[in-house]
Image (tube, grey):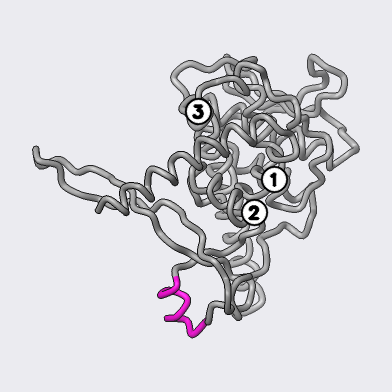
Amino acid sequence: MAKKQAEKEEIYTTIDETAKEVLSDPTKLQGYLDTQSRMDRYSAANALLIYKQYPSATQLKSFGDWGEENVKINKGEKSLSILEPVEYTKKDGTPGISYNVKKVFDVAQTNGKRLPAPSVNRDPQQLVAIMLDTAPVKVELADELPLPDMGALYNNDKQTLYIKRDIGDSVALCQCVAQELGHAQLAINSEAYSRRDSGFQAVCIGYMVCKKYGVDTQNFAIGRVPDELANAEPKEQREMLSKTRTAMSEIISRVSDELYRQKQERSKDRER
């Protein structure tokens, strides 16, 4: 038990140190966001651990789970350590959640076949349409927005996402919509929302959504980490990354569900 506890404490230390690293170095931040965008179902804490140990990971399973699929781990490969939630009953009878260290291997460390990455065929117009169709707030067209280079703007007072008419650059529009949806999702998930305070988080969300679906990400200013965040305590940094990951995951979940629905519809049409 002492050995397991020491291992767990080392994992938590690694999470804190990695959070500090990625929020102090734009290159490392980009690497972390790339990892989290692929591993969107993993918590921010686990994404930090994955980025630190095997940043290119795409599919993780334990030795036993790979074995059940008749997939063998390549000789000499080292396992990754992540946290696995475990439910338990407290002394007062209420449920609680603890975390154990779990050893996993990426598919690239095995003789297994890698799964194709989810995509919308790198079509920004399709991604924009799906994001707007599944948006959790009202969507309206606008002739003008506060800044000339803005393609979209979320107004929290009206809980409305405004889209500028006649934007010819579909990539730029996709980037704007993804970022502004980040604002909308953060506002929905927060008791107190400030556009200024949430600006950097929204940029990171927009970056990850576009990265997930193969849309250009060069215009996202992810290198401009606010000083108050870069110098924050590890707990605050983890909380920010966790909220950012949650908002990103909710957007991606809606997009993925709609992509699946459309795929099912196309299959039915072919059967007819």
- Quadrant of the image for the C terminus? bottom right
The part of the image, by quadrant, that contains residue 170 is top right
Cα gap from disc 2 to disc 1, whole angstroms: 7 Å
Q: Is residue 120 above or below residue 231?
A: below
- The residue wearing badge 2 is 55
* Number of the label disc, if any, that sits on residue 31: 1
In reply to whether residue 67 is colored magenta, the answer given is: yes
Q: Amino acid at mark 1?
A: Gly
Residues in magenta? Answer: 63-71
- The residue wearing badge 3 is 234
Mark 1 burial class by Cα count in 10 Å: few <14, some 14-19, many 20+: some
Outermost residue to the left: 92
SS type, badge 3:
helix
SS type, badge 2:
loop
Cα gap from disc 2 to disc 3, whole angstroms: 21 Å
Image coords of residue 251 (percent x, y):
58, 42
Image coords of residue 132 (percent x, y):
66, 39
